[in-house]
Amino acid sequence: MNVLRRISTKWILTVLAVVCIPFVGFAWYVDTQTAKRQWEVVRYYLLTMACDLAAQLDGELHERALDIELQAENLATVWAVEDLDGGRIDFAKPLQSGFDRFVQKSQVYDLILAVDADGRFVASNVVRPDGAPFSAAVRLALEQRDYRAESWFQAALVKRRGDERQSVLVDHHRSELLPPVVEVSTPHPQNYHVGFAVPVYSHLEPDRVVGVTYALMRWDRIQEQILKRKRPKGSEALDGVPDSTSYQIYRTSYAWLWTADAETIIAHPTTSLYGARVSRTPVNLPQLVDAARAEDMGFYPEYSFKEKRKNAAFKHCAGPEKGGLGWVVGVGIDNDDVTSFIEGLQETLIQATLSVLAIVVVLTVFIARRTTAPIVALREQTKRVAAGDLTARVTVQSRDELGELAQSFNEMTEQLAQSRKQLIKAEKDAAWREMARQVAHEIKNPLTPISLSAALLKRAKDEKSPEFDSIFERTIQLVTRQVEHMRKIASDFSAFAGAKKRAPEVVELGGVLDDVLAEHAAWAAEARVVVERSGGGGKVLADASELRRLLINLVSNAIEAMPQGGKLDVRLDRVVEDGAPKLRLVVRDTGVGLSDTVRARLFEPYFTTRTHGTGLGLAICARLVDEMGGTIELENLPPEQGPGAIARITLPEHPGA
């Protein structure tokens, strides 16, 4: 065949000319020229976002501190009002109403309360931001609490008017002042707060602190600020544009928050990590702690978490000296999410490949149609052959390798069809010959004593022997026994061929087993075989007569295997295999055991080691067990348990058991 006509040559030349050579060079260019630029862009944006988030958090804390300072200033004004007799006006109710409005309007705080200089409760809000009222128990606990022991109260009392920061901040915590908002076993943002304590100064004595205003800011506000940031301005135009590098980084990155010591997680997309130590299990990233402690801002070393490689940047928030809490903001991104191409590269890629792709498409479609059409036809015909249809043929349309393959396929199916006919005929002939030979052999054995007895009976009659009556009686008994034997032979052949129509029903296996053992009790006693039955019972779906035949075969074979006497153990138990309940029957004897030859041919029809029988007993057993959906095993006992054999039959237990 001409080399150029081969289909493999056509494909190789086409791919090399149209696809491989241009794209290999282009891939090399992309890999070597853009990787460094891409990661520089990613790291720049990560650091920028970390700094931006840190500034937002500092601004958030500053704004919230101003809120509470304003409330404290308003409170100081009310606190200074006295009546003409020198008594203090009761302003608890107005304060409570004002606090309720403040909490519901801002939607930022769960609690704001006023405490006097002696640590006694003055007023607080009594409703949550959603308008739900506090329970009576919560209100009573707030009113009766002694606030003098609170660290924020003590810190607020020593503040001086004119200090740069009037507020005292209490870092991320679960407050004892309020019960959990969400009753869950794992950490939840709504159950955490940041506290703001602001001293209330007397208007009459400007440097004297007359009370403290304390508020609990909802932590889910911080969590939302970090994890659900607003989209970059103008990013709506970038939806569906995967090559916009900055937008893709912003969209796929995620942020977290640590305490000032860069060790404890206080905000994270996975809230179950709240309170986890970064350098310990389950995080185990001490190198990140070291990096965050070494600098005010920068990049973490590339690391792996949950089997994913990641890059991240960090920035410290303002510390306590600047009115902040010194939190460490981290912004990370999975390496797998990093954009593969940037906008300039995408434009170059489109320009460089449009012409090549046009040629590739045209040539690929043309060659694919011509090449795959005979392959598809061959596949369909192969399925027909696999399903047994040997009349399948493929039309030869070319002179290349596919054409030769189609021709070979047609020749193969023709030969297979002829071979099948010959094989079926040979198998049928062999089966009939073997069946005829075995039936003739089995029937000839009982016919011989019948023929001899009949001849003896005729001679006794002709000679008018005085023993004619006794000879007649013995002959009748012998003929009866041999006829019964031939009936047994016919029954065995019929059972092996499956000629009887099965009538499956729910049968109590233990009961049938007990009946069979009872029927064989006299034989076992005569053979000096001790029978022990253990275990319980169970129901199976089977033909009762076939199940009985199966058990009779097993028991009789076991007794015959102990000509010198012995012990027969029969046990029936419930077991579970592959998640399904089953019944396991174990028949163990102490007989002569099985030779290697016998074990190799146990379940073959017409194979027997005895001088009588059809050799179909175990073959029938195997077929019956298979039809009932079970398994049968027959093997020698382990050497340490002495001589003998063990048979195991496992059958599905009926669901109604």
Image: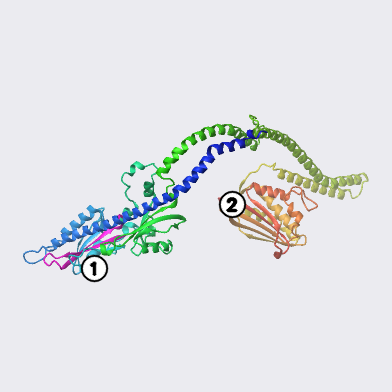
Magenta segment: 192-221
Helix, strand or loop under label 2:
loop
The residue to which callout 2 is attached is: 653
Quarter of the picture containing the N terminus is top right
Name the residue furthest left.
Answer: 84
Image-quadrant location for residue 50: bottom left
Toward the viewer: 559 or 394? Answer: 394
Residue 558: x percent and y percent?
A: 72, 57
Q: Along the horizontal axis of the image, is 59 left or right of 368? A: left
Expressed as whole percent of the image width and height from the top left, the position of residue 422 reads 75, 36
Q: Earlier in the sequence, mark 2 or mark 1?
A: 1
Q: Which mark is residue 574?
A: none
Residue closer to the observer: 108 or 559:
108
Residue sitting nearer the eye, 108 or 584: 108
Which residue ends up furthest to the right in the rendered image?
A: 463
Amino acid marked by disc 2 = Glu
Label ID, residue 155 = 1
The amino acid pointed to by label 1 is Ala
**Relative to 605, does residue 264 appear above or below in the rendering?**
below
Mark 1 crowd level (few <14, some 14–19, many ≥20, 10 Å Cα): some
Q: Is residue 203 magenta?
A: yes
Q: Residue at x 47, y 56 (%)?
A: 307
- At mark 1, the secondary structure is helix
Residue 489 belongs to the span the image colors magenta: no
Residue 126 relative to residue 439: left or right: left
